Image: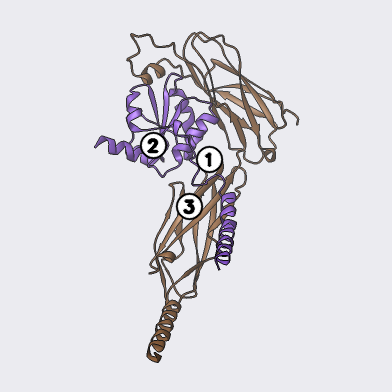
């Protein structure tokens, strides 16, 4: 009986020793919330760690969930008591709204529950300008009445004026104050709708926050509906071959809505 | 004895609910049981093929993956270069055609995001997401 009891104590002691001797990364935080400033191109999260174990930890891989995020660690090996961080750089690109990206870190920790850690980066991206709809179009032969694009400016961007530039002279664009504060109404009108035309509308706010930003929209007069004889023609060819592309011309400039 | 066991079980259940509710609130937009897209907006490769030429394929993957290979005739539209690529796509869009967006695999989210933006921002109708994405397309070719 006594021998069994001693054996049990021995096993417990060895287990405790083994636990103490093993490597373990302790993360300061595994989730980071970021709020990039207006016009920022990147959001960077720092995930700090410390090896609280008695043996070194080696990173096997640090992998981001998407190509838009680059993740790297300072060192491949973390000695006992050493600290470091994994940096995740999220390229914002044209993204807006809440973005959640993850980074999976794998170490050589023999305990599977500690070997893999999921780091989460959450970024809330507020756009300078919200445009809706980004496309206005007229059917071939439709009455060439103006159609409205609404541009809602971020209140922190202090946008007083919008310039709208059409890539072709076949459309006119006029900018007025919208019904709500920080809102603009872009009235787009084709000169005629008898032939297919496509224009890129480049919307340029006068924001002091980010002077380089422009936003796209498009205006189109659609080609005539395909007749049975032309229906088998590849769509891209039939659409694009009839589209006229001219050098860009300034189409409209609007004064501040004043609110 | 029985009453005590039931009480303990209920207590444990209540304790488990606290972090669960917290997580549900924190990840309210990403809850696992809530599919980000309704089934009616998902199409299988088979369905998409049955639509024939009446489809505009949109590749939501990063540029390098699109350059490596893509569905024949697909237009590149990813969120890395949204402002540059959107006008190119809108120039090819046609109201009679269905738009099918795809990304790398079942697990990727890019196609859902792009499809949502086309519906919300460009106000396009008939925008679908390819179930299984590029990976599924490749499998169907084998």
Please name the residue that numbered disc 3 is placed on.
A102
Residue B131's mark?
Answer: 2
Residue ID for mark 1: A95
SS label for mark 3 = strand
Near mark 3 (Cα within 10 A), the count class, few <14, some 14-19 or many ≥20, is: some
Viewer-side residue, A221 vs B3? B3
Which of the chains is purple? B
* Quadrant assignment, res A152: top right
Residue A76 placement (x, y as % from top left): 41, 66
Q: Chain of mark 2?
A: B
Horizontal side, residue A240 vs residue A147: left or right: left
**Could you tell me how far apart the alpha carbons at marks 2 and 1 are, in whole angstroms?**
22 Å
Query: Circle 3 marks a residue in which chain?
Result: A
Q: Residue furthest right?
A: A258
Q: Give yes or no for contact between labels 3 and 2 (Cβ–Cβ under 8 Å).
A: no
Q: Nearer the viewer, mark 1 or mark 3?
A: 3
Q: Nearer the viewer, residue B132 or A11?
A: A11
State if disc 3 and disc 1 touch (CB < 8 Å). Answer: no
Foreground pick, B48 / A62: B48
């Amino acid at each position: 009986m006594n021998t069994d009891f001693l054996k049990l104590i021995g096993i417990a002691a060895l287990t405790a020793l083994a636990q103490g001797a093993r490597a373990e990364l302790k993360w300061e935080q595994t989730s980071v919330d970021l709020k990039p400033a207006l016009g920022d191109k990147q959001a960077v999260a720092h995930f700090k760690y410390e090896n609280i174990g008695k043996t070194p930890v080696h990173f096997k891989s640090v992998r981001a969930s998407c190509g838009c995020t680059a993740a790297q660690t300072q060192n491949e090996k973390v000695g006992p008591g050493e600290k470091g961080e994994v940096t995740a750089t999220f390229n914002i690109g044209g993204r807006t709204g809440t973005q959640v990206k993850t980074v999976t870190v794998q170490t050589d920790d023999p305990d599977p529950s500690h070997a893999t850690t999921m780091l989460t980066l959450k970024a809330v991206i507020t756009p300078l300008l919200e445009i809706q709809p980004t496309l206005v179009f007229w059917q071939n032969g439709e009455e060439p009445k103006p159609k409205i694009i609404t541009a809602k400016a971020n209140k922190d961007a202090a946008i007083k004026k919008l310039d709208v530039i059409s890539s072709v002279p076949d459309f006119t664009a006029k900018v007025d104050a919208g019904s709500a504060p920080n809102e603009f109404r872009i009235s787009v009108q084709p000169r005629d709708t008898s032939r297919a035309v496509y224009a890129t509308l480049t919307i340029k706010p006068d924001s002091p926050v980010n002077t380089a930003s422009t936003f796209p929209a498009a205006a189109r007069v659609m080609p005539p509906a395909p007749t049975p004889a032309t229906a088998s023609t590849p769509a891209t060819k039939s659409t694009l071959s009839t589209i006229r592309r001219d050098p860009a011309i300034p189409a409209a400039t609007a004064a501040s809505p004043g609110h | 004895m029985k009453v005590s066991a039931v009480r303990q079980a209920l207590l444990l259940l209540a304790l488990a609910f606290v972090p669960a509710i917290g997580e549900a609130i924190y990840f309210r937009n990403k809850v696992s049981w809530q599919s980000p897209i309704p089934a009616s907006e998902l199409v299988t490769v088979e369905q998409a093929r049955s639509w024939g030429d009446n489809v505009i394929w949109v590749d939501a993957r990063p540029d390098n993956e699109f350059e490596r290979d893509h569905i024949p005739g697909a237009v590149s539209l990813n969120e890395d270069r949204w402002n540059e690529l959107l006008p190119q796509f809108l120039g090819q869009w046609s109201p009679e055609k269905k738009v099918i967006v795809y990304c790398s695999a079942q697990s990727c989210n890019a196609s859902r995001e792009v499809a949502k933006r086309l519906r919300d921002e460009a106000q396009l109708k008939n925008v679908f997401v390819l179930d299984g994405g590029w990976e599924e397309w490749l499998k169907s070719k084998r």
